């Protein structure tokens, strides 16, 4: 047989195929000695897929995948596993979690995400930035979420809630069924539309609202998402190299044009509102006045695309998480009449004292706060929290050492939200957790009750660094 001008035997072909398969197989397992070399107990991986085979096949949710890994290390403070070919460390021990996200925060301030911000400009947001650029942007955006700013937005919240009450009254009078999940999603969409974009999305009044449709489409598992997941099996950077975007061009243009048009209208007509986009516009103006050197890679200059990206993440991260939490909260209240009655009495008493529901009166409702916290315990919104090691870190009480680039993951699960995990059933509502005296005895147990506390812990660490 002749190939490329050379005589080739069947043995040569067989040898070439075997060699190619051996190289491919080696590539698929080349990272699997990572935790063994460090002396860390790890979950046995599958070539190419690591411990995420069913997740990659689409037959398992990421939360269930992480729960399975968490349960594998039942009696361990931590353990190694693999997302495709990438090694990660599952941290379980509360003291160790606190060590990572608080005491040694400077070793773990990167979130461990790999994105191409030039290919996907909407990914150029606080959630995905790393290093000094993340710190610079975070310092700029932190004032946007102060209690004073939230207080100014309170009337806009109430307007959207009034629309929801109107919808409920209308449905009740007609004896129509109320889709709670869809109603909460529409409420969250309208609140974010008003508080972030300064626009009336009218999702509650208009069932065909373009913004509700856009939010629904973005949260769907598309072929694009599946393709990116498949490419990441080979390499985290492969989607970027092949130009496979996270969002299609129409969705990208929709949000970028929405933000740009809103800002242009306000600038041309001298309009100001108490909302997120106005805060970003003010920050952009400050950056322009400061004349920051664009070549300084440690600084972030707020431009139109960066403003659009951070408004976009405000929308995406806000509406689905809020809607889901409210839906589960209402479901639990419907199943626990005693808790529902007590919460209603607190709300009624608060309205009698203040005459209305506003920022100040909401802060007084401690039982409401505990009801929301218990909802988040049973139905954690964040499937996991991942951090990438930015400086070599010795695992306390162990000879193992994490190097730069190693990633750690924390998994909030309903069955491990309290110090005594053997006494709490995963699917039970803990009425004791709604009592003021039952606060967990460890800072990180509070983190597990409300994943949002991790942000507060990071803020404290950043202010000390």
Image: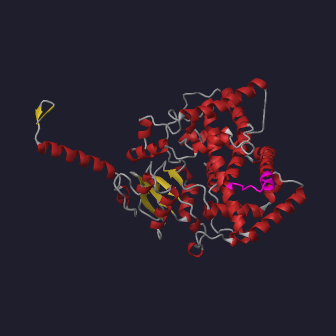
For the point 39% across and 44% down, which residue is it? 235
In the displayed structure, would residue 294 be above or below residue 245?
A: above
In the displayed structure, would residue 215 be above or below residue 305?
A: below
Q: Is residue 385 left or right of residue 360?
A: left
Q: Is residue 110 left or right of residue 277?
A: left
In the displayed structure, would residue 416 be above or below residue 326?
A: below
For the point 60% across and 66% down, which residue is it? 417
Q: Is residue 395 left or right of residue 23?
A: right
| Residue 126 in picture, x, y percent from top left | 59, 42
Looking at the image, which is closer to me, 170 or 285? 170
Question: In the image as oriented, which residue stretches furthest toward the bottom?
Answer: 423
Q: Is residue 80 magenta?
A: no
When asked about the image quadrant of residue 13, the answer is: top left
| Residue 438 in picture, x, y percent from top left | 69, 71
What residue span does the magenta drawing correspond to?
A: 168-180
Is residue 463 among what the camera can see? no
Looking at the image, which is closer to me, 190 or 132? 190
| Residue 175 in picture, x, y percent from top left | 77, 57
Question: In the image as oriented, which residue stretches furthest toward the top?
Answer: 268
Q: Count every numbered label the image shows and give the total.
A: 0
When asked about the image quadrant of residue 296, the answer is: top right
Q: Is residue 173 magenta?
A: yes
Looking at the image, which is closer to me, 345 or 44? 345
| Residue 430 in picture, x, y percent from top left | 66, 71
For the point 50% across and 62% down, which residue is it? 67
Looking at the image, which is closer to me, 194 or 23? 194
Is residue 461 among what the camera can see? yes
Q: How is the image coloured?
A: secondary structure
């Amino acid at each position: 047989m002749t190939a490329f001008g050379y005589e080739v035997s069947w043995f040569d072909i067989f040898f070439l195929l075997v060699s190619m398969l051996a190289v491919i197989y080696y590539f698929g397992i080349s990272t699997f000695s990572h935790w063994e070399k460090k002396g860390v107990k790890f979950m046995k991986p599958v070539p190419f897929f690591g411990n995420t085979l069913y997740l990659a096949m689409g037959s398992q949710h990421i939360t269930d995948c992480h729960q399975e890994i968490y349960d594998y290390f039942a009696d361990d403070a931590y353990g190694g596993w693999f997302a495709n070919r990438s090694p990660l460390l599952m941290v379980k021990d509360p003291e160790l979690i606190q060590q990572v996200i608080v005491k040694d925060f400077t070793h773990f301030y990167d979130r461990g995400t790999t994105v191409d911000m030039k290919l996907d400009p909407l990914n150029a947001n606080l959630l995905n930035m790393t290093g000094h650029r993340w710190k610079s942007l975070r310092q700029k955006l932190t004032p946007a979420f102060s209690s004073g700013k939230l207080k100014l937005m309170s009337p806009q919240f109430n307007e959207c809630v009034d629309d929801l009450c109107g919808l409920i009254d209308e449905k009740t009078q007609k004896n129509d069924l109320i889709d709670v999940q869809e109603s909460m999603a529409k409420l969250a969409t309208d609140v974010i539309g008003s508080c972030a974009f300064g626009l009336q999305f009218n999702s509650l009044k208009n069932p065909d609202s373009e913004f509700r449709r856009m939010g629904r489409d973005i949260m769907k598992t598309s072929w694009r998402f599946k393709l990116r997941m498949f490419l990441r099996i080979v390499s985290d950077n492969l989607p970027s190299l092949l130009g496979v975007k996270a969002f299609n061009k129409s969705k990208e243009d929709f949000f970028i044009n929405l933000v740009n048009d809103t800002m242009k209208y306000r600038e041309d007509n001298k309009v100001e509102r108490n909302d997120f986009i106005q805060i970003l516009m003010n920050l952009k103006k400050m950056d322009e006045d400061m004349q920051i050197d664009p070549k300084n890679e440690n600084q972030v200059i707020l431009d139109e695309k960066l403003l659009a990206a951070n408004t976009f993440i405000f929308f995406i991260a806000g509406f689905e998480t809020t809607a889901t939490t409210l839906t589960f909260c209402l479901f639990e209240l419907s199943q626990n009449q005693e808790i529902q009655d007590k919460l209603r009495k607190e709300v009624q008493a608060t309205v009698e004292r203040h005459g209305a529901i506003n920022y100040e009166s909401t802060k007084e409702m401690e039982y409401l706060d505990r009801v929301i916290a218990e909802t988040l315990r049973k139905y954690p919104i964040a499937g996991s929290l991942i951090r990438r090691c930015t400086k070599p870190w010795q695992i306390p009480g162990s000879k193992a050492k994490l190097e730069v680039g190693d990633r750690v993951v924390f998994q909030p699960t309903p069955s491990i939200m309290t110090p005594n995990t053997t006494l709490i059933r995963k699917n039970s509502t803990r009425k004791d957790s709604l009592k003021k005296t039952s606060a967990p005895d460890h800072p990180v147990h509070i983190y597990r009750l409300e994943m949002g506390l991790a942000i507060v812990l990071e803020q404290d660490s950043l202010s000390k660094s």
